[in-house]
Image: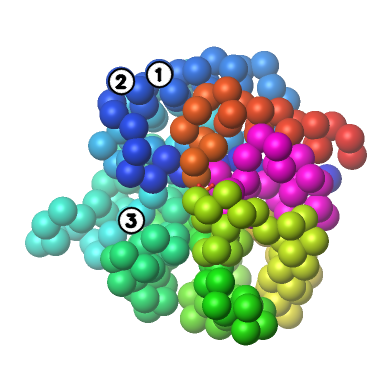
């Protein structure tokens, strides 16, 4: 069985000292774990330096929550791929539904961001997901296919191999309504099949497809036990060390049973 990824997306939360306490607690409690579970922490940009310092003593990975679609230059307020690379950041979340919705990030912009990350050896965690009305209209498969075709399926096979996908149904994000294990498995299998048609079976099998949307300590085990769910992108439940550590425990338990 391949590894499981548990990624925490802190979004725009936590002050500096709480951020430090949170990451230290997660790092300390991750020391004796097997290397079958990869833990990625994605704090706000301003805490990345602190996070990468702590990470050096641990087996955590650090990710950014965004990346500029531009190179360094006259883009006030932007954080470029080159900057992230120079801070030893390993991952960047791209295409989160909150970026799409509140910051008008289109598929074209997201493709530029993907290319910027890849050029700087930062592994994208690329999010896709349908709205509630799209699921209710039975358009969810069509929407996901289109999102993939407009973005990651435009990458070369070599670049795609560095992409981790996160299926995050928008109706499940921050709502407390989680996709059922059947809904998650069905969509993840659909996505894997599309990857296989596009890039071949080996790449499809190797691709990590995470589930995100109200994933927590009580549902992580059953979600991660699904054959095509390779871990989770966790928002709210990543902000409390004990809850997040329980999710990591659930991932460990899934890897241990196979
Ligand atoms: P949630 O967020 O776990 O709070 O639903 C997930 C995400 O937005 O990545």
The residue at the point 26 percent across, 37 percent down is 46
Q: CA distance from mark 2 to mark 3?
A: 24 Å
| Residue position for label 1 | 21
Location of residue 250 in the rendering, given as x and y in whole percent from the top left corner: 73, 33
Residue 241 sits above or below residue 171 on the image: above
The residue at the point 11 percent across, 57 percent down is 76
Which residues are drawn in magenta? Answer: 210-234
**3 or 129, nearer to the observer:** 129
**9 or 242, nearer to the observer:** 242
Reply yes or no: does residue 67 show up in magenta. no
Callouts 3 and 1 close, C-beta under 8 Å: no
Q: CA distance from mark 2 to mark 1?
A: 6 Å
Reply yes or no: does residue 230 show up in magenta. yes
| Residue position for label 2 | 17
Around disc 1, counting alpha carbons within 10 Å, would you say few (fewer than 14), some (14 to 19), or many (20 or more)? Answer: few
| Residue position for label 3 | 67
Q: Nearer the viewer, mark 3 or mark 1?
A: 1
Location of residue 112 in the rendering, given as x and y in whole percent from the top left corner: 36, 71
């Amino acid at each position: 069985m391949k590894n499981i990824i548990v990624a925490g997306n802190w979004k725009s939360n936590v002050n500096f000292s709480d951020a430090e306490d949170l990451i230290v607690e997660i790092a300390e409690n991750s020391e004796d774990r097997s290397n079958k579970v990869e833990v990625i922490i994605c704090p706000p940009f301003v805490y990345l330096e602190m996070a990468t310092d702590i990470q050096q003593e641990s087996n955590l990975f650090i990710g950014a929550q965004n990346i500029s679609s531009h190179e360094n230059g006259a883009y006030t307020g932007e954080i470029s791929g080159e900057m992230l690379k120079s801070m030893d950041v390993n991952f960047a979340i791209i295409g989160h539904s909150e970026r799409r919705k509140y910051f008008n990030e289109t598929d074209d912009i997201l493709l530029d961001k993907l290319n910027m990350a890849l050029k700087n050896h930062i592994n994208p965690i690329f999010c896709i997901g349908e709205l509630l009305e799209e699921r209710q209209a039975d358009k969810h498969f069509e929407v996901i296919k289109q999102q993939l075709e407009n973005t990651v399926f435009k990458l070369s096979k070599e670049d795609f191999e560095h992409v981790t996908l996160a299926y995050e149904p928008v109706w499940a994000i921050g709502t407390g309504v989680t996709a059922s294990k059947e809904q998650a498995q069905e969509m993840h299998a659909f996505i894997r099949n599309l990857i296989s048609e596009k890039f071949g079976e080996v790449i499809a099998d190797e691709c990590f497809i995470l589930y995100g949307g109200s994933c927590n300590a009580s549902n992580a085990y059953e979600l991660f036990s699904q054959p095509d769910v390779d871990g989770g992108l966790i928002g709210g439940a990543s902000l409390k060390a004990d809850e997040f550590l329980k999710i990591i425990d659930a991932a460990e338990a899934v890897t241990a049973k196979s």
